[in-house]
Amino acid sequence: MSTAGVLLAAGAGTRFAGPQHKLLAVMDGQSVVSRALESLLGASLDAVAVVTGAVDVSEVLAAAGGEIAAIENDGWESGIASSARCAASWAAQHGHDAIVVGLADQPFVTSAAWQIVAASTAPVAVGTYGGRRGNPVRLAREVWPLLPHGGDEGARTVMRRFPEIVVPVACEGSPDDIDTVEDLRRWS
């Protein structure tokens, strides 16, 4: 069974009022997206991809080295659902059986969280933190057609519609995201 890790990094980050896009904002000497990507790469999954759109993260991908696929989401403005569908389409084209999806603005999700969620055999596995659902989320190939076609929800829509196929997976770390300059200050 082949499992790919996918980092969603396509959104505009409009709530972040800083001098650059939130994913490129620096915390502790490293950009937010670099920290998130480093954790994903540390999980040693079969493949790694980053869905891009509003901001150019090509320098980050190049600096990370290794085989990282950049998936351009031309429809990123329509919401996160389009990025989830891009990830599933890319995975299908490359013969993967599952994708584990996380967000590039969540730099505190650990490599161990990526690994433990990826190891699940459930159709949908969701990382939980203190009982609260977060990311990453594992989506088996059979659920990819259930992903919404538009809007600001991806896997969450599938989990709500089909709770019987969802398995929570306890994770260490934090699913907190960097959405605002205040978030960045609090975590820096």
Image (cartoon, rainbow, N blue to C red):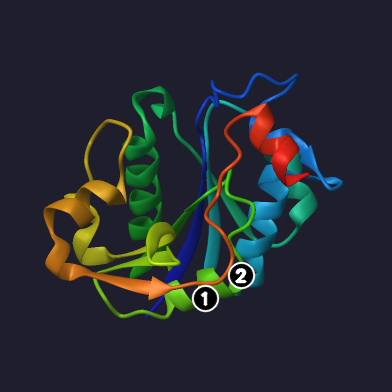
Secondary structure under the numbered disc 2 in the rendered image: helix
In the image: residue 21, left or right of residue 139:
right
Where is the N terminus found, in terms of image quarters? bottom left
Residue drawn at x 72%, y 23% is: 20
- Labels 2 & 1 near each other (Cβ < 8 A): yes
Q: Position of residue 90 (x, y in %)?
A: 40, 52
Pointer 1: what residue?
Answer: 115
Relative to 128, say whether 134 is above or below. Answer: above
Q: Position of residue 176 (x, y in %)?
A: 55, 49
Relative to 183, say whether 96 is above or below. Answer: below
Residue drawn at x 52%, y 75% is: 115
Relative to 44, say whether 66 is above or below. Answer: above
59 vs 13, nearest the viewer: 13
Pointer 2: what residue?
Answer: 111
Residue drawn at x 56%, y 59% is: 174
Q: Position of residue 120 (x, y in %)?
A: 36, 79
In the image: residue 16, left or right of residue 20:
left
